[in-house]
């Protein structure tokens, strides 16, 4: 095991963002099983006297300054939220009064000290003065409690309002991203760290409380200090003892570990190639996710998985750590200064004892003032430490605010076009023309083409079927038409316009797509269908019509809540921590059946629809889009639309779709020959990322050495006696 070992000899990583072979640009550090790659910024020289290494170190630390405009913007935004400004002012006022309380308490303690002093000197006590001070102090404690309670209630209200505002901000920040940008790991992590949708306290709220904390602490310190100086002026050795009492907090502040794990690291990324670590994480995920449970149980895999996990962990030993944990370990250093803390703590007591020996008559009074000083000094120094800590965490908060706003500026990789589409909405009623001109595309690795030099043309209203083996590039064609991705080379034309110049919203409003890997949203079936056409999402009759067209109406009536049934309930029921089937302390069997019955709760949040039924819902969503008469759809894209359908449902679906011929251009991707290909106006046979053959069924069957004809015959043979 070795932490923090810096390597000058760079190894080629198998993944990761930076190129570690570039000696000048990237610094590589080994952190446990992790490889940390840090960008080395080009040195900027303010003056030739300042060494480059200093400016390189300084830049990431000064990054925080870039946050200031965002902090201002955040405060302005909060001010605009309804009722937030008066609530905030009120909160500030309460905080101000509460911050004066410790000084008031200190003043009362000083008055008690005076009473003790008089008692020692004159052997008398002013009863009325003592009673008055005690009453005032009690009233002060009650007022502090009430004000504190009011502050908490007000804070909760304000926090909720601010959270409400920023939850929409966060939703927008995530919702607006396109597929390639959203799937980018770096973007994904930035979103997770800055716009968490579930956090109880928003970045903005942390910023407010942090700032208020500093404001309150300054008020506390100034007021306490003024009272303390006033009291100690009159005491022998008071100021000496106070100074000694402050030594400990100052010492511990100067010698503490203040560097946060992220601070000052600049632009960086970390990756691991450790097989055991990667595998152990995979095994952990597999065992915790309900999606894999069925296979694990049926395949009797758990014992093997446990054994494998144990082996991985055994080999990893102390290195079995996430990146941040490993980095923290690396930063932890032995500090001799920590050992000195206790002797420094004892210093006031030692000095007091020595002074008392020299001047025994002053012991009782000095003892009282010593107690006052040390207890005040400790509360005072805690306040100072707290404030200094807050000022360093405020830098973190500044950066969080910056990230919160900057995620709104992450550019989408698929750039929007300016041209309105269609120029004439009536033309769409006849379908859309699609043309691919020498299109090439690869997903990540630019050497692996998903499509290579593909050209074809589909006329308006035509039915086109793309056919070919697994991985040949069929789905990719559909994704490029819907501009989920942009081609690396070549051009796609829609009704003669370059697809990249068209307004994206317009383009997508004229296309309806059913992806092969369609999803079901954790929403009601109604929502799952109506999302196909947001402008008519509230029109229940249209949703029912779409369900009929998609073949979903047949099973909807058997569901408990019909169209309003949730496929995958987004909110899980919450249960006590005592597992079902066990016994309570007094021997009762734990059984949730009765409780579930009373609350109409189910055992699983997922609805049990079959694969085919799920596909019918996805189909209904696609049909929903085509029901919009104001913005008619001109192009339907179907990726394996009948993969999970029974033969009758498949036949009915294709019948319905064929009726749309002439009014919409339709493109199907399929492995299956027959029903569709027979009726297609154009068949594209695609293999190894390229179009190999194209034509109608009759043309391809008549063609010599046709690959299409060969596979057709293989499939047809299965049905011959
Ligand atoms: N999101 C992705 N990231 C990286 N590679 C991808 C991605 N999607 C597809 N590929 C790769 O691109 C190639 C073409 O995939 P595509 O999905 O277009 O094939 P397909 O013909 O639709 O296959 P199938 O019949 O199995 O659905 C394949 O080699 C595949 O591995």
Image (tube, helix red, strand yellow):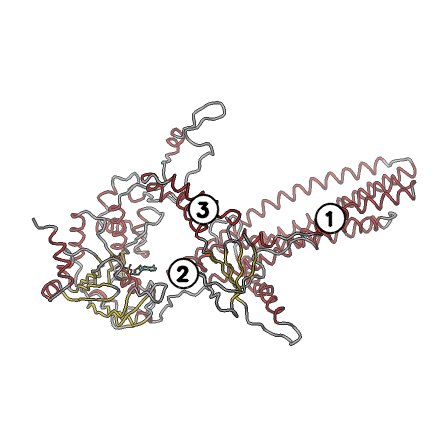
Q: Callout 3: helix, strand or loop?
A: helix
Residue of label 3: 312
**Separation of residues labelled 2 and 3 (CA atoms):** 37 Å
Instruction: Give the residue at x 69% y 39%.
Output: 142
**Separation of residues labelled 1 and 2 (CA atoms):** 52 Å
Asked if residue 171 is positioned above or below residue 583 in the image, the reply reads below
Instruction: Give the residue at x 80% y 45%.
Output: 373
| Residue 275 visible in the current orientation | yes
- Residue 13 in the image: x percent, y percent? 45, 61
Total number of numbered discs in the rendering: 3
Q: Give the image quarter of residue 699.
A: bottom left
Task: Identify the mark nearer the N-term, 1 or 2.
Answer: 2
Residue of label 2: 177
Asked if residue 313 is positioned above or below residue 495 in the image, the reply reads above
**Separation of residues labelled 3 and 1 (CA atoms):** 42 Å
- Residue 523 in the image: x percent, y percent? 35, 47
In-image side of 366 versus 589 (left or right): right
| Residue 169 visible in the current orientation | no
Q: Callout 2: helix, strand or loop?
A: loop
| Between 347 and 99, the one nearer to me in the picture | 347
| Between 28 and 697, the one nearer to me in the picture | 28
Task: Identify the mark nearer the N-term, 2 or 3.
Answer: 2
- Residue 220 in the image: x percent, y percent? 71, 51
Residue of label 1: 341
Local crowd size for mark 1, using a 10 Å CA cut-off: few (<14), some (14–19), many (≥20): some
Task: Identify the mark nearer the N-term, 3 or 1.
Answer: 3
| Between 136 and 553, the one nearer to me in the picture | 553
Mark drawn on residue 362: none
């Amino acid at each position: 095991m070795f932490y923090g070992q810096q390597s000058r000899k760079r190894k080629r990583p198998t993944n990761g963002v930076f190129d570690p072979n570039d000696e000048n640009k990237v610094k590589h550090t080994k952190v446990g099983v992790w490889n940390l790659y840090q960008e080395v910024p080009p040195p900027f020289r303010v003056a030739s006297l300042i060494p480059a290494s200093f400016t390189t170190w300084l830049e990431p630390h000064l990054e925080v300054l870039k946050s200031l405009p965002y902090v201002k913007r955040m405060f302005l935004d909060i001010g605009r939220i309804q009722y937030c400004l008066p609530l905030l002012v009120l909160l500030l006022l309460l905080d101000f009064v509460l911050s004066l309380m410790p000084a008031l308490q200190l003043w009362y303690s000083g008055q008690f000290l005076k009473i003790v002093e008089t008692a020692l000197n004159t052997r008398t006590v002013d009863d009325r003065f003592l009673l008055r001070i005690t009453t005032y102090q009690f009233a002060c404690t009650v007022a502090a409690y009430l004000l504190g309670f009011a502050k908490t209630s007000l804070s909760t209200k304000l926090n909720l309002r601010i959270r409400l505002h920023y939850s929409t901000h966060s939703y927008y920040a995530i919702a607006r991203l396109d597929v390639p940008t959203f799937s980018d790991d770096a973007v994904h992590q930035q979103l997770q760290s800055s716009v968490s949708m579930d956090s109880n306290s928003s970045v903005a709220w942390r910023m407010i409380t942090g700032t208020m904390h500093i404001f309150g602490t300054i008020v506390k310190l100034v007021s306490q200090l003024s009272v303390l100086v006033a009291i100690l002026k009159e005491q022998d050795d008071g100021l000496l003892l106070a100074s000694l009492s402050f030594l400990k907090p100052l010492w511990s502040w100067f010698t503490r570990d203040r560097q946060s794990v992220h601070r000052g690291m600049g632009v960086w990324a970390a990756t691991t190639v450790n097989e055991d670590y990667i595998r152990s994480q995979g095994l952990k995920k597999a065992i915790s996710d309900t999606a894999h449970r069925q296979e694990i149980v049926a395949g009797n895999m758990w014992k093997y998985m446990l054994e494998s996990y144990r082996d991985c962990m055994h080999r990893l030993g102390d290195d079995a750590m996430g990146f941040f944990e490993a980095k923290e370990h690396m930063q932890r250093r032995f500090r001799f200064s920590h050992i000195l803390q206790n002797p420094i703590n004892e210093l006031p007591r030692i000095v007091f004892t020595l002074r008392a020996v020299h001047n025994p008559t002053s012991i009782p009074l000095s003892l009282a003032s010593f107690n006052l000083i040390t207890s005040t000094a400790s509360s005072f120094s805690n306040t100072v430490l707290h404030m200094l800590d807050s000022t360093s965490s405020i830098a973190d908060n500044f950066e969080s605010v910056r990230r919160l706003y900057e995620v709104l500026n992450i550019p989408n990789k698929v750039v929007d076009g300016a041209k309105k589409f269609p120029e004439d909405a009536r033309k769409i009623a006849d379908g859309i023309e699609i043309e691919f001109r020498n299109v090439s595309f690869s997903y990540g690795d630019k050497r692996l083409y998903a499509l290579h030099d593909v050209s074809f043309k589909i006329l308006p209203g035509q039915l086109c079927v793309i056919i070919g083996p697994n991985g040949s590039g069929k789905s990719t064609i559909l994704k490029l038409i819907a501009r989920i991705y942009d081609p690396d080379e070549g051009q796609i034309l829609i009704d003669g316009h370059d697809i990249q110049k068209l307004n994206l919203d317009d383009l997508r409003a004229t296309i309806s797509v059913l992806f092969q890997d369609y999803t079901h949203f954790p929403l009601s079936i109604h929502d799952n269908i109506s999302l196909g056409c947001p402008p008519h999402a509230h029109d229940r009759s249209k949703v029912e019509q779409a369900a009929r067209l998609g073949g979903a109406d047949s099973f909807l009536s058997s569901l408990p809540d019909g169209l309003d049934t949730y496929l995958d309930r987004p909110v899980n029921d919450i249960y006590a921590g005592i597992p079902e089937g066990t016994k309570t302390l007094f021997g009762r069997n734990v059984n949730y059946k009765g409780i579930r019955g009373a609350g109409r709760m189910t055992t699983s949040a997922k609805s049990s629809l079959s694969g085919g039924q799920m596909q019918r819902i996805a189909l209904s969503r696609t049909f929903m889009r085509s029901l919009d008469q104001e913005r008619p759809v001109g192009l339907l894209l179907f990726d394996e639309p009948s993969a999970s359908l029974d033969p009758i449902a498949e036949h009915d679906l294709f019948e319905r779709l064929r009726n749309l011929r002439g009014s919409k251009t339709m493109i199907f991707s399929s492995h299956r020959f027959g029903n569709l290909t027979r009726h297609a106006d154009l068949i594209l046979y695609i293999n190894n990322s390229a179009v190999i053959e194209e034509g109608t069924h009759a043309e391809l069957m008549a063609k010599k050495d046709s690959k299409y004809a060969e596979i057709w015959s293989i499939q047809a043979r299965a049905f011959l006696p």
